[in-house]
Image (spheres, coloured by chain):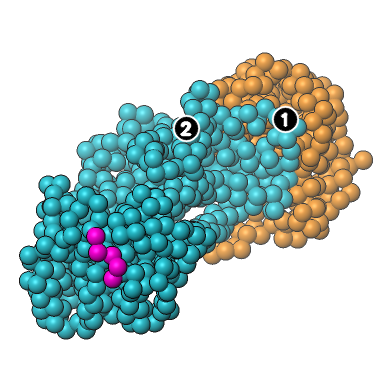
Chain colours: A orange, B cyan
Amino acid sequence: MSILKIQDVTKVYEGKVTHRAINQLSFEVEKGEFLAVMGPSGSGKTTLLNMISTIDTPTSGEIIINDIKPHDLKKNDLAYFRRRQLGFVFQDFNLLQMLTVEENIVLPLTLDDQDLETMQARVKDVARQLGIENILEKRPNEISGGQAQKTAIGRAIIHTPSLLLADEPTGNLDSNSSKDVLGLLGRINKQENTTIVMVTHDPIAASYCDRVLFIKDGEYFNEIYKDNHRQTFFQAILNVLSLLGGHVGDFSTVRLP
Amino acid sequence: MTFRQFAFRNVIRNRRIYATFFISSVASVMVFFIYSMLMFHPRVEDEFLREIAFQGMFVAEVILVLFTLFFLFYSMRAFLEARSKEFGILLHLGMEKRQLNKLILFETMITGFAAIVVGIIFGYAFSKFFFMIVREILQIDSLPLYFSWKPFALTIVTFTSLYIIISFVSVMFIKDDNLVSLLRGYWHNEQIAKYSVWKGIAGLLLLAAAYGMAANINKEYLVVFVTLIPPFAMIGTYLFFTDSVPFILFQIRKHRKWYWHKYRIVSMAKISSVMRENSRMFFISCMVSTLAFLAIGILSSMSTFTHQYHQLNPLGLVYSSKLDNPYEKDHISGLIDELEDKGLSYHLYKFDVKRQTSSNTQKTVKILTQTDINRLALVFGYPVVSLKAGEAMFLPYSMDSIDELKRKKVTTVLQENSIPLSINKVYPKVLFSPTELGTNVIVVSDEDFRLIKEPMVGANAKQSTNHIFVFSVPEWTKTKDIGQNLDALMTEAYMTNHENDLPFYFENPGLDYSFIRSTFALLLFIGLLAAAVFFLASGSFIYFKLYAGLEEDKKQFDALRRMGITDKELRKIVNSQLIPQFFLPWGLAMLHSTFAFMALQVFWKGIADLSIIREIFLVLAAITCMQLCYFYLIRWRYLAHIRAI
């Protein structure tokens, strides 16, 4: 069963220079799948992610999440849809500095006005799952990048969303933290059966996924599926990337574990 | 491109960033210029400045400059913080700190000069309008527009030096030794406000104590209370913003059931960070607002004051003389000459006041005749009196005393002459003020008055009877220059404590009134201008702060939007971020001034039985409305910025 359907989506930015960011793109994501979207700079990855997270609307075509067409919803219903169905992880964490780690994590539930017992139980669960129980009382500026991203992931999964979106989640992390965070995402994907769509530059990050979708200049380019061995999958990703013909500078430094 | 061109282009091409700084600078210059125009006004100088000491006006202006300095300095800092990324790039490219200072100096001077020029042009254009308002307040006949180099020179010199000082001081706050943090841009370093529980509680207690004292002030402990309240309120306010508010917020955050509820969690966090960043600013803003409220409130009661003052002092000039006063003739003819010189019409009444001891109270009572009172009553259109022998009537000395004496019925004997009297009425209007005749005055029938022959015990015949000369002048507010020589003699006697040896007493309500009014007028200037500048300053400052943190806020709101926050909730969060900034210092200042007025009410009553509640309420309401408009304006701009992705 597909949880996310992208059908002939086109996004055109009007302005002094009309720019076609996404062109006739179609793909589907199955429930429980861990998908990476890769592509060179300016290929429309972030535009695509913004449209899926419903804060941007496609010029034409349809996006269907969980059999709902969010772009047809009214403004308020759309906000409720986002707070219940979607989770979002950012490259620079975007934790609210004035809240503690615990409060950051619980935020989506409080927005949805759940009762206190449920919230406290969920925070405890999630914190244990992420291994950040000992920093719950700290502030975002008192913890490391890896812990911050784990907190952000906690915030994104506490309300058990049907779709978890991640925009370069390892972009600001060192290699160890990256490995941690990616392992965590993989585990959440396997254990909770959470569907994840991740946009990334990093072939290593992509190699943790079930499937990698490549886009170029806003159009579908290629896709490859995971095989048994991560090393070979990683090599396959590198091969496609070199085919993609992006510039070397587009890729973040390859960090072998 | 020369260095100067670079600075110039920086300003011109960044005009949107510079606009807010520029506009508030223009407004400060404008207010200052209008004020200087008034200060150097030829008519102002010779009409009322003579009484309000020139120093007073000068002090007002210094206060204004200090506020402006404070405000410009703060906005400049916020402005530079917002641009720290740009400075980071310049330093990264190898610019020396010295060059950066020069660049900022150039830029500030370009904006500053433009602001001075525009401000003066606007100020000159609006000064006529302002003069019209001042003319109304001070009741001066005319206040024409004039041209003189003095206000221009003063404004230009003051503001040029202000801008130089500010640009030199504010560059010291750019930390060029930490390039990375500069490049990263201005970052809200949002830590929990460090506060001490004791200080927090102390702040609340001090405020409570100050309010309690202000509410229960009385004349006996006036001096103690008046010396204690201001420092209590000031320290209390400071601690309230730095410690009490974080303390209270922390207590609230403990209650998760309430705190973990919808957007409240974000709102509360926003409020705490706003409080942490701005506590000192809030303190100053609160104190200045309180002062401004007080000044404006007192002034707004002026119209009531004029009316009531006249009711309490309906007679014009009053000259009271003992029978052995050798100067009586000279003084009276001198006053008549002066009145005629000024072309003021008057009626002169002369009557006698006798003093006796009342058997009822064993105190001195002053006695007038029915005929004398009726003569005065006819002039003012007051009711006339008709008394039989043995009857008497109280003469009230204030509005309150009328009600008080109404209930009083006394049978007494004038001891020295054994004249029995029954006093069971009160004259329904105030004719004499307590300083003129004292508080124990009665009217008797002409027959009884003639029977008073023996002088009061302990006094000879000459001291027991006074002549009172009353000049009833319809244009009583214009008599302030009459009898200045007598006034000088009185003042001298008071200074040397010989007032009882003086054979006469002279009172000029016109002069007293003009003294009181001029003092208030000075307060009005300080109050209005300080309020105007501060209004602008606090509003713009909030805007600067928001502007400086805009990038960070945008990111946060983007995260919140992705988390599914509705538009309504977003607006509520922004409200909770803005409302404390606008209304917390304001609200506390309101509370401060309410209690101050309560205290003042007691003090005021002691002077002249005035009640000023209604006027004050109106003024506070008007100010709140203005603040509300400002709030909506800034919220509208801020929301527009936040919503744009």
Q: Nearer the viewer, residue B260 or B443?
A: B443
Give the residue at the far right of this rendering: A1
Dot 1 lies on which element? helix
Q: Quadrant of the N terminus of chain B?
A: bottom left
Is residue B220 among what the camera can see?
A: yes
Give x and y (percent) for residue B202: 49, 27
- Per the rendering, the mark at residue B256 is 1
| Residue type for callout 2 | Leu
Q: Give the chain letter at badge 2.
A: B
Q: Is residue B50 above or below residue B211?
A: below
Image-quadrant location for residue A30: top right
Read off the magenta span. Answer: B450-454
Q: Residue at x 72, y 30 (%)?
A: B256
Dot 2 lies on which element? helix
Image-quadrant location for residue A203: top right
Q: Is residue B123 above or below residue B488?
A: below
Q: Nearer the viewer, residue B576 or B523?
A: B523
Give x and y (percent) for residue B356: 30, 57
Q: CA distance from mark 2 to mark 1?
A: 30 Å
